[in-house]
Amino acid sequence: MCGIVGVVSNAPVNQLIYDALLLLQHRGQDAAGIVTQQERKFFMHKAKGMVRDVFRTRNMRSLPGNCGLGQVRYPTAGNAYSEEEAQPFYVNAPFGIVLVHNGNLTNAQALKTELFNTDHRHINTESDSEVLLNVLAHELERTTRGLPLQPGDVFAAVRNVHRRVRGSYAVIALIAGHGVLAFRDPFGIRPLCMGHAESTVMLASESVALEGTGHLFERDIDPGEAVFVDLEGKVHAQQCADSPSLNPCIFEFVYLARPDSVMDRISVYQARLNLGETLAKRVISTVPPSEIDVVIPIPESSRPSAAQLAQLLGLPYREGFVKNRYVGRTFIMPGQSVRKKSVRQKLNVIASEFKGRNVLLVDDSIVRGTTSKEIVQMARDAGARKVYLASAAPPVRYPNVYGIDMPTSDELVAHNRTVEEIRTIIGCDALIYQDVEGMKRAIGALNSKLSGFDASCFDGVYVTGDITAADIERLNRSRVGGDETEGEGSRLALPNPGGGA
């Protein structure tokens, strides 16, 4: 999961891209990068860390130009500790292209071999985004054949990218001297939208990045569609997939996206309200409302669902946990072992809301179960008489292969376990899950034009139709890894003007 943005304007865009990345910070906190273009020259700065830490005044001054793009990274493949894998990625031919990508390619290893043996292109990192960039560059080279670039050539190249690449991808690329290209995979798994202000066109992962920077949301990019914005701000668009269908990742609505975003014509906030409504019916069938004294959300994404559930059940809604937003990273010094951060560093209880009460805790989802177990114990330690736990999402039973850092099957608390077995592990008095079909109906009712959802982590159905058990095992091996002492070698990318942050 990452957040991406691209801008074409008649004024400098560095501050605008920075502001948009701040609005997308929830989509990735590992690394951030911005590239701008002036007179066909790219200027780039990227590094590990949050947006506010990566970009200082000197860095912003070294990013001139009226078009550019940026990304906040949450790594799901490759090396989490290598700054070399922070985006954007750059390739110098044809034209000069920089690219940011949100998603996960499921055939990256096969493409890497193909790029080396057939396309004669070199991949220098473990990132599938570099693979995608080189596939795009190769296809642009084939379609232009040394001639000036036309929008039709761009669309022909994207059409060939769709035929070669598998998985999920929302992409924004800057082609030196020509403009910004954006496209979305044929299933529309990862989000991408477009908006405008006076003399500015912006493309971004979520509508909140547009609205928060004073742009008017125009529309979502369709699955398989490519949009090319030339340097004069003229927008060219064309469908480039053979059989596109809209199957967005349902986890975006459950947890990933900001509640004030609208994605594929669905209000994320309304989707979460709907999930609370259907969850209320599940609660009634498990625990009589008369046995519940108070409904308490586990911050943050569960709040709309918890509030709607409480209203429908006629129960008090209270805030029982306060989230510490400033928990930093754990620094590993010589001679020290890794210290696992406790949930208690991130959440603190308001004891008066628990003491002597039967509490219903509402979470957006339960993945590993370790956090849920600790939170239930925190509620008991605060004096709760009984602790019930409800999840606005169904049991997470399968790994995600489309760009969410979902653990392997063995790490998922719900994998091959009954609800009663999960309840015992977590230690709550009752455990209530959303059901898969109820979740799909609750969110799908908000857009009748949906073909369906990618709900693979809940139902095990991978919408691209090409995922086997062997693929999942291989993709799990390529999950993020590394060591914080790694990544100090030379960089085969655009230099960061002005040095580090």
Image (cartoon, rainbow, N blue to C red):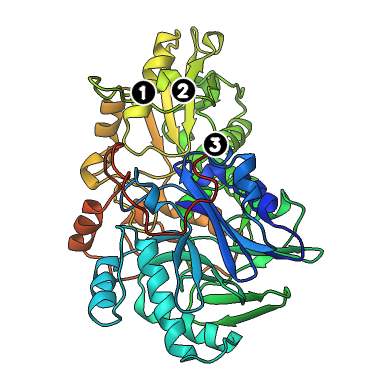
Question: Which circle, 3 or 1, is nearer the viewer?
Answer: 3
Tell me how far mark 3 sits from mark 1, CA to CA.
22 Å
- For badge 1, the amino acid type reads Lys
Q: Nearer the viewer, residue 255 or 239?
A: 239
Q: Position of residue 245 (x, y in %)?
A: 48, 74
Q: Secondary structure at mark 3?
A: helix
- For badge 2, the amino acid type reads Lys
| Vertical side of 187 occupied by 2: above or below | above
Q: Are marks 1 and 2 in contact (CB under 8 Å)?
A: yes
Q: Position of residue 67 (x, y in %)?
A: 66, 64
- For badge 3, the amino acid type reads Asp
Q: Residues within 10 Å of mark 2 (few under 14, many from 20)?
A: some
Q: Are marks 3 and 2 in contact (CB under 8 Å)?
A: no
Tell me how far mark 3 sits from mark 2, CA to CA.
21 Å
Name the residue rendered at 54%, 33% in the picture. Answer: 300
For disc 1, the marked residue is: 341
Q: Are marks 3 and 1 in contact (CB under 8 Å)?
A: no
Q: Earlier in the sequence, mark 1 or mark 2?
A: 1
Q: Nearer the viewer, residue 241 or 165?
A: 165
| Vertical side of 237 occupied by 311: above or below | above
Residue 417 in view, yes or no: no
Q: Residues within 10 Å of mark 1 (few under 14, many from 20)?
A: few
Taking 93 as reference, is 274 left or right? right
Residue 414 in view, yes or no: yes
Which residue is farthest right?
A: 198
Q: Secondary structure at mark 1?
A: loop
Q: Nearer the viewer, residue 496 or 410?
A: 496
Q: Position of residue 96 (x, y in %)?
A: 50, 73
Q: Secondary structure at mark 2?
A: helix
Q: Earlier in the sequence, mark 3 or mark 1?
A: 3
Tell me how far mark 1 sits from mark 2, CA to CA.
9 Å
| Vertical side of 70 occupied by 220: above or below | below
